[in-house]
Structure formats: structure tokens, C-alpha cells
Image (spheres, rainbow, N blue to C red):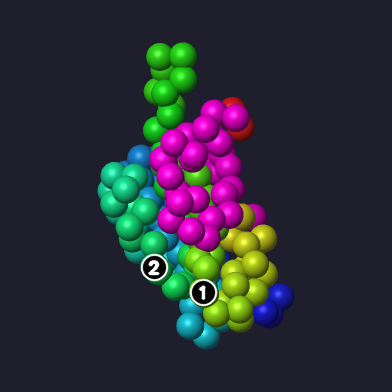
Amino acid sequence: MSSGLSVNEDVVLEHKKLKEGKINYLLCKVADDSSAIVVDRSGNAGYYEFRDLLPGAAPRFALYNYEVTADAAKTTKTVLFVWQPEGAPAKAEQMYAAALPYFSAALDGIAIKLQVGDPSDLDQQSVESRLRFNR
């Protein structure tokens, strides 16, 4: 992976929409030519709909604005899911591991990063408990 890997400007613009609450999820991928991290898709979806958007055999960086209720107060936390599903090509896994620092450095306001590789890792109860633990 080149040390010149960049985060596409569209990722930054969509992340701004996420922070403003205009969208609640953002899926990003490494471009086919491995030159940049680009937007795969973004929009609004319930948690389970969002989870179902993750591709079965391809890694992604997935940001989701997760609502957490604690002490009768609702708060929204941005979760970065580093999706590396079982069976993904080794080269793709290495590419995403190398791209993660660039992606993380370009975006602020991420409450927690979760490395996930199986749909069971995305169980809503598990995610919520990890968010509460990291308050």
C-alpha cells in the first residue's frame, strides 16, 4: 500500500453530513486502483438495515450514528465498524489494515472503533454494551 493513500473529498463531505445528522450511515471502501478511500454509499437506515448493507465478502469502513440511552437521556455516538468478513481475500484485508490510519486521521468525532468480521459481531446488544463501556 502506497504511503500516498488519500481520503477522497467526498468521504469528508459525507462525514460532515453524518456529524450534522443529515445521514446516519456512511460506507467507505478502498478504490479499485488502491489510490484512495472513497464513498461506497451513504444515507439513512435503521441499525439492522445498515448491518445488512455490509457486503458479504468484501471489507469496508462503516460509520453509523448509533443512538444510546443512558440514565434516561438519549445520545448519539458515531461508531466506526472496520468490517473484515471471514473469507475476504488476504490482500484486501491487508489493504484495509494499512488504510485504517489514514481513514481515522481524516475524520473526527468517532466514539469507538469496532473490528468486526462476522454478523454476530454486529449484534445490537453487543454494540450497545461496548458503547456504554466506552462512555
Q: Which numbered circle lies on residue 75?
A: none
Q: Residue at x 61, y 32 (%)?
A: 134
Please provide the residue range marked out in magenta: 105-133
User: Are the two marked residues, 2 and 1, in contact with CB atoms closer than 8 angstroms?
Assistant: no
Reply yes or no: does residue 131 show up in magenta. yes
* Residue found 56% across the figure and 36% down from its top: 130
The residue carrying mark 1 is 87
Q: On the rendered structure, is 106 left or right of 75?
A: right
Q: Amino acid at mark 1?
A: Gly
Quarter of the image that includes the C terminus: top right
In the rendered view, tell whether residue 110 sits above or below residue 37.
above
Q: Secondary structure at mark 2?
A: loop
Does residue 22 sit above or below 134 in this rendering?
Answer: below
Rendered image quadrant of residue 57? bottom left
Q: Quadrant of residue 39?
A: bottom left
Q: Position of residue 126 (x, y in %)?
A: 49, 39
Going by the picture, which residue comes out furthest to the bottom?
A: 33
